[in-house]
Image (cartoon, grey):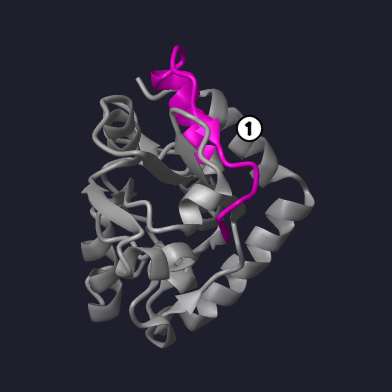
Amino acid sequence: MAIYYPQVPPYMYAANDNVPLGVVPELLNAFFDEQPYELEYVFENRQRAELGVYSGKYDATVLAEKWTEEPDALLFTQPIVEHHDYLYSLRPVTDEELTVNSNHSICLRRYYKYTAFSQQLSEGQLIRLDSDSEFDQFNMLVNGRCDLVYMNEHVANWLINNHFPDTHFYRNSVETDKADLTLALHPKWAVLKKRLDAYIREAHRNGLIDRSLARHMRKKPR
């Protein structure tokens, strides 16, 4: 299982002993305790994780179907978490500003596809600056290297609470996009995917995932 490095709390991160923590490892650890397979985590960057699942180097990674280069080549689980994505800034930015050719710079994650504003990026209304982590995105914003940051609500809230408590961020009142946090599996795991889907549905039904998310939103890696 390839999980992302740099880390993405509260979904997946590691303590000083490099033991994976977060909503995703907690769910998977519980699931594989009941399966005849040994689960091994590999820290990997976003691009190599996706390519590794295509090639069979990795069996699975965390990936939404809408973000993939070849969605038909992978199997996608039931959603683990639905998250909403917003634009963040250090001053209020109106929708009108974002629809004109204003040349705002926007900090984004390297190797990520952003379908919500691909047209603005291609037409130069938004100028893309890549970073290696969500922490770096906010850090670049705070240091005046970009005008906007695009990030999902859970990661943004975790970072603000744990790393930027004294900075006032403005968040667009309307979500820019939303996505399901899913696992992408190599096609050879079709049978296991059925069991995993059933486990995820039950984890939603009994509140396990909601409790896990709430707990890891408060927890800072040591």
Q: Nearer the viewer, residue 51 or 208?
A: 51
For residue 10, say whether it is visible. no
Q: Residues within 10 Å of mark 1 (few under 14, many from 20)?
A: few
Residue indicated by mark 1 = 214
Q: Quadrant of the N terminus?
A: bottom left
Q: Who's the residue at 67% across and 36% down the image?
A: 211
Q: Quadrant of the C terminus?
A: top left
Disc 1 marks a residue whose amino acid type is Ala
Q: Nearer the viewer, residue 176 or 188?
A: 176
Determine the residue located farthest toward the top in the rendered image.
Answer: 166
User: Residue 169 location, x and y as percent?
Assistant: 49, 27
In magenta stretch: residue 159: yes
Side (left or right) of 164 relative to 42: right
Side (left or right) of 34 relative to 65: right
Determine the residue located farthest toward the bottom in the rendered image.
Answer: 72
Query: Relative to residue 149, is residue 28 depicted above or below?
Result: below
Q: Nearer the viewer, residue 191 or 67?
A: 67
User: Residue 21 location, x and y as percent?
Assistant: 42, 37
Q: Quadrant of residue 153?
A: top right
Query: Relative to residue 168, is residue 117 depicted above or below?
Result: below
User: Residue 40 location, x and y as percent?
Assistant: 32, 54
Tally the numbered discs. Answer: 1
Q: Who's the residue at 30% across and 73% down the image?
A: 53
Determine the residue located farthest toward the right in the rendered image.
Answer: 205
Magenta stretch, residue numbers: 154-178
For residue 160, say whether it is visible. yes
Query: Mark 1: which secondary structure?
Result: helix
In magenta stretch: residue 103: no
